[in-house]
């Protein structure tokens, strides 16, 4: 049983603790560890279920206001709780938020009215298309281009590693519009999946299966009214969106780590060895202590960043610290849990084996650990 004492920390309000309790009960009744091969269908089902139950409205933030309506602490608690139950459920929730976050933050009233209610209801699947074959961490190297022609933009190029690629109903796409060199000449657009010239070039299979694809744009015409923010401000749009959801990546890692610690505790207390339990060995006790300390350290950094953003503070450094620490720590906690399970720990679809696959990508996406280190140092030097 996961320790819930963290819900009484001063980062939270009573409504946050109630939200976690309600979601935990809902997930226990409605989210199952699915071992089927049709990941697309599972993801669609989870989006519909999360929308019907009202959970996705937290990811969207509102249909008429802007980013202030997004409750970062709520998003983080939801991701942590869903990740503890099922990695794909967390993914389904997170991508609805990340995919529509730029619309919540920078979309016109018309954009928000057109897309956000459907995202919140689970009726439309969203995606965030930033990375390219030669432009992942280095956004300034982006090659996908958009040229304005009257009241439309024409997009050409490719995107890759796009979560929800192949099942999304629309994509927030970042393309070079050339107002200035580098990152200052990028703009963001909403591209509907049925737009002529848009295609799924390749589906990508990864270590923890979820919908992922390479996208191709061939003279895709997008109305200028579906540009998010000002022309040339796409990098700002992307970073503002990631500042919200990067902290929630830390929360997902925290959920994985808590589940691994729960599994390890149960294993240690139940596994008989040499006339005693695994928990009786001092080596086991030392490892459990390290795991628990790492989990609490990650939680403190994660919810500090979430609280700070909800207070209106800048969280670029704090979100990077949380994301780096929580994902790296979760990898260590999960690895230790696998070790405690011995041979059973590497059996396909055992909880700790599944967690071992789930956590690895979190140390890479939305900024690899090494990129987080650069962000933290850059912000420190700027502050000094």
Image (cartoon, helix red, strand yellow):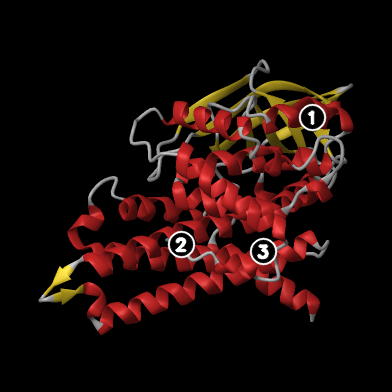
Label 3, on which residue? 319
Kindly identify the residue that appears in the image at 79 percent across and 39 percent down: 62
Label 1, on which residue? 147
Instruction: Please provide percent x and percent y for residue 145.
Output: 72, 34
Q: Classify residue 204 by image quadrant.
A: top left
From the image, state whether disc 2 or disc 3 is nearer to you.
2
| Front-lying residue, 72 or 321 | 72
Q: Considering the numbered disc 2 on the image, is that residue within a helix, a strand or a loop?
A: loop
Disc 2 or 3, which lies upstream in sequence? 2
The residue carrying pointer 1 sits among few (fewer than 14), some (14 to 19) or many (20 or more) residues within 10 Å by Cα, namely: some
Q: Determine contact: label 2, label 3, CB under 8 Å.
A: no
Disc 1 or 2, which lies upstream in sequence? 2
User: Is 199 placed above or below 139 here?
Assistant: above
Instruction: Please provide percent x and percent y for residue 169.
Output: 63, 24
Kindly identify the residue that appears in the image at 54 percent across and 59 percent down: 368
Q: Which mark is residue 2?
A: 2
Q: Is residue 346 visible?
A: yes
Which quarter of the image is occupied by the C terminus?
Answer: bottom right
The residue carrying pointer 2 sits among few (fewer than 14), some (14 to 19) or many (20 or more) residues within 10 Å by Cα, namely: few
Q: How many numbered marks, from 0 up? A: 3
Q: Give the Cα separation between the discs numbered 1 and 3.
A: 34 Å
Q: Is residue 215 visible?
A: no
Q: Classify residue 380 by image quadrant.
A: bottom right
| Front-lying residue, 193 or 132 | 193
């Amino acid at each position: 049983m996961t320790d819930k004492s963290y819900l009484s920390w001063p980062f939270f309000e009573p409504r946050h603790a109630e939200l976690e309790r309600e979601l935990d009960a809902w997930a226990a009744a409605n989210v199952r560890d699915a071992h089927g091969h049709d990941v697309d269908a599972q993801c669609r089902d989870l989006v519909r279920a999360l929308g019907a139950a009202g959970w996705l409205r937290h990811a969207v933030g509102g249909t008429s206001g802007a980013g202030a309506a997004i409750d970062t602490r709520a998003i983080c608690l939801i991701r942590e709780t869903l990740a503890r139950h099922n990695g794909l459920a967390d993914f389904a929730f997170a991508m609805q938020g990340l995919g529509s976050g730029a619309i919540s933050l920078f979309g016109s009233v018309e954009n928000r009215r057109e897309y956000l209610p459907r995202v919140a209801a689970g009726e439309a699947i969203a995606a965030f298309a930033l990375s390219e074959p030669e432009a992942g961490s280095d956004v300034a190297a982006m090659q996908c281009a958009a040229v304005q022609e009257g009241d439309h933009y024409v997009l050409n190029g490719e995107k890759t590693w796009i979560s929800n690629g192949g099942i999304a109903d629309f994509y927030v796409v970042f393309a070079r519009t050339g107002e200035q060199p580098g990152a200052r000449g990028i703009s963001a657009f909403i591209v509907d999946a049925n737009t002529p010239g848009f295609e799924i070039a390749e589906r990508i299979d990864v270590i923890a299966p979820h919908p992922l694809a390479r996208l191709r744009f061939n003279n895709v015409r997008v109305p200028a009214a579906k540009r998010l923010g000002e022309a040339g401000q796409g990098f700002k749009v992307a970073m503002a969106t990631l500042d919200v959801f990067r902290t929630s990546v830390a929360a997902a890692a925290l959920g994985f780590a808590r589940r691994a610690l729960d599994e390890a505790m149960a294993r240690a207390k139940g596994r008989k060895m040499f006339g005693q339990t695994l928990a009786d060995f001092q080596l086991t006790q030392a490892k459990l202590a390290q795991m628990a300390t790492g989990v609490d350290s990650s939680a403190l950094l994660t919810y500090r960043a979430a609280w700070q953003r909800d207070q209106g503070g800048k969280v670029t450094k704090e979100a990077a610290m949380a994301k780096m620490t929580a994902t790296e720590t979760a990898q260590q906690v999960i690895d230790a849990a696998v070790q405690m399970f011995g041979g059973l720990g590497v059996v396909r679809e055992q909880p700790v084996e599944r967690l071992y696959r789930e956590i690895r990508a979190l140390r890479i996406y939305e900024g690899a650990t090494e990129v987080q280190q650069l962000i933290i140092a850059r912000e420190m030097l700027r502050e000094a």
